[in-house]
Every structure is written in structure tokens, then in C-alpha cells.
Amino acid sequence: MFPMWFFIVLMAIICYLLYVTRTTEESFLNISKNNFRKIHFWMKSISEK
């Protein structure tokens, strides 16, 4: 059996990694805009054919 402190340290590491690698609202909006542009370009290329 693992000691209690092992789980506490494990949770702290997981929470820290999630905090460090979080996506900010600004980067999320940039990702959404890029996907919208790709879809728009794809639809435009299909309609021209």
C-alpha cells in the first residue's frame, strides 16, 4: 500500500502540470479563428469547382 503523502504529492504534481499547460482564453480564440478560416477556405474552394 502506498502512504498517504504519496497521493498528496501525486495530486499536487498533476494539478501543477494542468496549471502550467492550461490554454488561455486568448489562445483558445486564436485556435477557433484558425479553424474557422480553414473551414471557410475549404467551403470556398468547393463552391468554385
Image (cartoon, rainbow, N blue to C red):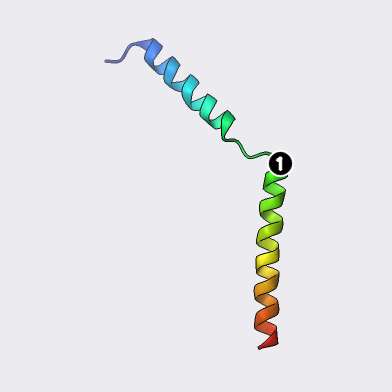
Image quadrant containing the N terminus: top left
Across and down, in percent, residue 42 comes to 65, 74
Rendering quarter of residue 36: bottom right
Element carrying mark 1: helix
Left or right: 25, with 4 as reference point: right
- Find residue 2 and report its image quarter: top left
Which residue is painted at 38% across and 11% down in the image?
Answer: 4
Residue 31: x percent and y percent? 66, 52
3 and 23: which one is in front? 23
Mark 1 — residue?
A: 25
Check disc 1: other Cα within 10 Å, few if <14, some if 14-19, many if 20+.
Answer: few
Q: 4 and 17: which one is in front?
A: 17
Relative placement, left or right, of 16 versus 44 is: left
Q: Label 1 sits on what residue type? A: Glu
> Is 25 rendered above or below residue 44?
above
State the image quarter where residue 48 is shown.
Answer: bottom right
**From the viewer's perspective, is residue 32 above or below residue 5?**
below
Q: Residue at x 60, y 36 (%)?
A: 22
Residue extending furthest toward the left:
1
Residue at 71%, 57% in the rendered image: 33
Instruction: Give the tally of numbered discs.
Output: 1
In the displayed orientation, state which residue is furthest to the bottom. 49
Quadrant assignment for the C terminus: bottom right
* Horizontal and vertical percent position of residue 11: 46, 22
Q: Is residue 30 above or below residue 3?
A: below
Q: Position of residue 5 (x, y in %)?
A: 40, 11
